[in-house]
Amino acid sequence: MATADTANASIDWTRHTRRAILLIVGMVAAVFGISVTYGFVNWDDPWYIHRNPLVQSWSLENLYGICTQTVTRNFAPLTIFSYLIDFSLWQTWSGGYHLTNIVLHAANAVLVFLLVRQLTGRHVFSLLVALLFAVHPVQIESVAWISARKGLLSSLFILLSLLYWLKQDRTQRDEYAGILIFLLALFSKALAVVVPGIVFVYDWIVRRKSFSDSLSRQFIPGLLAVWFIVLTAGSQNSQTGGIRHHLGLSKLEILGLDSVLLWKYVGMMFWPTDLAILYDPPIEGITLLMILCSLSWIGLGTWLWCQRRRQPLVLFAAATALAFLVPVLNLFPLTTLMNDRYLYLSSVPFFAVVIAGVESLWRLIQHRCRLQPLSFPTTARIAGTVVFCYSVLSIQQLPVWRNDLTLWHRAAQVSPELPVVQYQYALALWEAGEEAAAIARIQLALTLDRIDELDRERFLEKLAHFRSLRVSQRGNAADASSTH
């Protein structure tokens, strides 16, 4: 990555920063604003809001519970506190919760712009990275799903802490401010535990500090990260919900599967179609694919390491993207394999590397073919077209999150073999009054190969409940008819 935009030699930073921020916020509002008309969905939202007494009053008992209790397998007290504020403002109006998510995403996009510009010194480059982050379709799940709030909130504090920590001339005041904000990130979502590692790589690779000095600087943040891991240990051990057919794989098989999933994520960044709340990537019969993907990542990592002196920011960006994904690669078992929201912060270094790569490739072609440099207006039009295309894709796919029916109808199209998808679709159908269709969906789920005994027992119980309700309703209707 180059260190300066040639067109920005005499830039008025204040004026251009203000314009950039307005553009970023405007794009977020244009793409995601319609989600304030969407409802809650039956995937975690009830447990965070409607069935969560902790967010429904400001009693001392609730405040203590927010600080000490795990909710839906996550210890995230600041996130739960944000729902308490939302409930106080909006009660059960879903639009208010969606509005908070939109505001958080817009703030994160602005912070991405400021952070990338701080790292590269390039205004236009940073604006393009931030705009892609703001409008890309893989962000839909994080913004439109109320229960994804923890990712948005933790990202806000992660980006703020990195603004203090990722400086060439970091002061003691920066260190203390970074630690304080890092704590806030930890109490929003456990993902923040990777931040000390990111700062260590920056100090070692980009700032060219010694390995021991870089490591010692992260002693306190590292201790805080370890403390939080111990504090939250066991919160993700629940075996209910989600998908579990991968939990019996060995660590070596998981690493091989991760190498395949990482390339799938790369593909999603370039061509974000067929997005859904749950995916069903194959885990059997892909040994050769695992080997090829693993070798390709080893080769890419070796090349990046060899380039560390000439292009330290590229290696740093790649390491950062991987760091944000490490907690969700099932090295510690999770009841999911891949999700769009896992790419929320990883997308930032990805966009930066891709844009820098396109620039380098164009310069090479320009030199070899003796072409004239592209004018700034032409470059701006090309970049604007790319941002516009991804914005359109997001606007087209956003309505999937309008309600339960649209969410699970889409999931059933993308991952029809997942029993939990058919089950959640059945719950949505029942709530919509389509009782026969709901029962048929549960019956379908019970015939799928992936179902295990935990799900079978749960689904049969729900099926019996639905059938008894239908019988009861028919009886009441018959009584009413005979009375008339």
Image: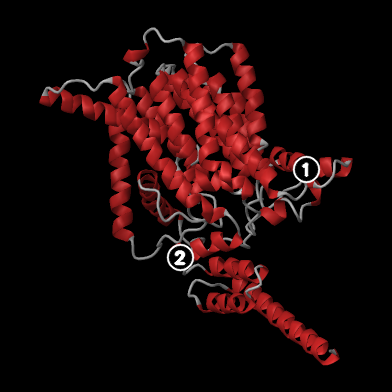
Instruction: Give the amino acid at mark 1.
Output: Ile
Q: Nearer the viewer, residue 288 or 31?
A: 31
Q: Nearer the viewer, residue 293 or 359?
A: 359
Residue 470 visible in the current orientation: yes
At 59% across and 15% down in the image, what residue appears?
Answer: 174
At 41% across and 28% down in the image, what residue appears?
Answer: 128
Say few, some or many: other residues with alpha carbon within 10 Å of mark 1 (under 14 / 14 to 19 / 20 or more): many
On the image, numbered disc 2 is attached to which residue? 413
Q: Secondary structure at mark 1?
A: helix
On the image, numbered disc 1 is attached to which residue? 66
The quadrant in which residue 34 appears is: top right
Image quadrant holding the N terminus, namely: top left
Q: Nearer the viewer, residue 338 or 87?
A: 87
Q: Would you say 222 lies left or right of 253 here?
A: right
Q: Would you say 376 lies left or right of 418 here?
A: left
- Which mark's residue is nearer the viewer, 1 or 2? 2
Of labels 1 and 2, earlier in sequence is: 1
Vertical relation: 391 (above or below) 212: below
